[in-house]
Amino acid sequence: MRRISLLPIAALTALCGLALAGCGTERAADASARTDVDQVRPGSSATATPRPDPADDESGDSEFLAFMMLLNTVVEPCAPELPTAVPPEESEAMEEIPSDAPLPDELPLPDEPPPTSEPRDPEEARQEIELSPVEKCEARRHTRRITKALAAGTADPAPSDVAAVLRKLGYIEERIDGPQRARGGVEFTLDLRVMGGSLCLSGTTTGTKTTIEPYGADVEVACTEVRR
């Protein structure tokens, strides 16, 4: 069974804040240094050349971090609780071991399997992967929030309308395939694979009815390349 490593919301939020703060500080310092050089360079004008706002360069990073936080928030209720304390019996056993006790002999490491020269069959990577229980739960939560948002839109949405709804929900453009008209509605695919996961969503909506099917995809192929 595939297991997904998850970061707590508080930890991920702090990490996002530190990453953006550090990035902004570094770029601001670099811009300041360049301005000083321009001002003292012989023949240069007294007015420094305006620099692009560092926030513009960070917009893509901020968007992706917000997307990661969205995925973490959606999947959090589906993930089993991690142990936060050592069981009492294990704690007592650890206390009984003297600090100067000799360490056991190192166990021999298993032999590494010989490298294979045979390339992987491309068709194998395109096979659908079975989702884990956590991913199935996550898929249901994504499906509910997307279906609800699309139902509140227009009765006969255009592909641009569906794209706008998905973006408003926090799904980033690089993880959205489509939307495009097909089979009397608008089709779209979402790539929600992060941290070793395999979750993809294939959806079709007419505005009044939305159908979303979850499935698993290998990381070596796009969600749209999976043979289902």
Image (tube, rainbow, N blue to C red):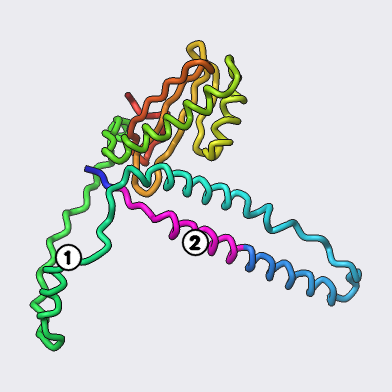
In this figure, which residue is indicated by the disc labeled 1? 87
Residue at coordinates 59% horizontally, 49% vertically from top-left?
60
Q: Which residues are magenta?
A: 4-23
Q: Is residue 15 above or below residue 146?
A: below
Q: Nearer the viewer, residue 87 or 204?
A: 87
Q: Is residue 120 above or below residue 147?
A: below
Measuring from the top left, give residue 109's x and y in whole percent.
Answer: 13, 66
Q: Quadrant of the C terminus?
A: top left
Q: CA distance from mark 2 to mark 1?
A: 29 Å
Q: Nearer the viewer, mark 2 or mark 1?
A: 1
Above or below for 42 versus 203:
below
Q: Which mark is residue 172?
A: none
* Quadrant in the picture for residue 110: bottom left
Where residue 135 appears, as percent x and y from the top left, is 32, 38
Disc 2: CA contacts within 10 A as few (<14), some (14-19) or many (>=20): few
Q: Residue furthest front?
A: 88
- Residue situated in front as seen by the camera: 188 or 86: 86
Q: Is residue 17 magenta?
A: yes
Is the residue marked by circle 1 packed among few (<14), some (14-19), or many (20+) residues within 10 Å? Answer: few
Report the residue at 34% width, 30% height from top: 215
| Above/below status of 12 relative to 71 | below
Residue pushed farthest top? Answer: 184
The kind of residue on which mark 2 rests is: Ala
